[in-house]
Image: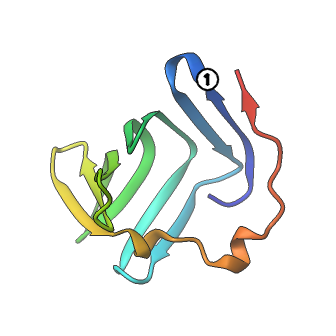
Amino acid sequence: MKDMEECGYVKDIDFVWLKSKKKTEHTFEEIGKLVQYGCEVTANVEQNKIKKLKGVKAKELLMWDTISQISVYDPPTGKIYFKSSLGVGKTFPVSAFEIPKVEQKKKVGEVKEV
């Protein structure tokens, strides 16, 4: 997400949120997927899994499909699994979602823990 204004984590219920000024679109070049992040993204997190994800959509053919769950396998296989709100799942290589080292070095702001 670009122009992020706020993010936080409620440890007791494993809830995270991200807020930005506007919707952001990003193309993951390695897999050719266009993804849209809403102004607010929320989810419940647990080890190897993001559940009840809201605010993230992926373009499939001519329509946007809401992503509801993301998980990685344990033991690691190098694959990441995405499930849509319609129950359709797809697996991609984890490497397609790695952040380039140049972007990792950007200054990170404060994270709220509630």
Residue 2 falls in image quadrant: bottom right
Q: Nearer the viewer, residue 43 or 102?
A: 102
Q: Which of 82 and 76 is in front in this view?
A: 76
Residue at x 18%, y 54% (from the top left corner): 89
Q: In this view, does 58 lie above or below 112?
A: below
Q: Which of 16 and 105 is in front in this view?
A: 105
Residue 7 falls in image quadrant: top right
Residue 65 placed where, x, y %? 29, 54
**Quadrant of the drawing holding the C terminus:** top right
Q: Name the residue under label 1.
A: 10
Q: Nearer the viewer, residue 58 or 79?
A: 79
Residue at x 46%, y 69% (from the top left corner): 97
Residue at x 44%, y 50% (from the top left corner): 56
Q: What residue type is labelled 1?
A: Val
Q: Residues within 10 Å of mark 1 (few under 14, many from 20)?
A: few
Which SS class for mark 1? strand
**Quadrant of the drawing holding the N terminus:** bottom right
Residue 69 placed where, x, y %? 32, 44
- Number of marks in picture: 1
Q: In this view, does 5 lie above or below 98?
A: above
Residue 8 placed where, x, y %? 67, 33
Q: Is residue 69 above or below residue 37?
A: above
Left or right of residue 9: residue 28? left
Q: Which colour scheme is used?
A: rainbow
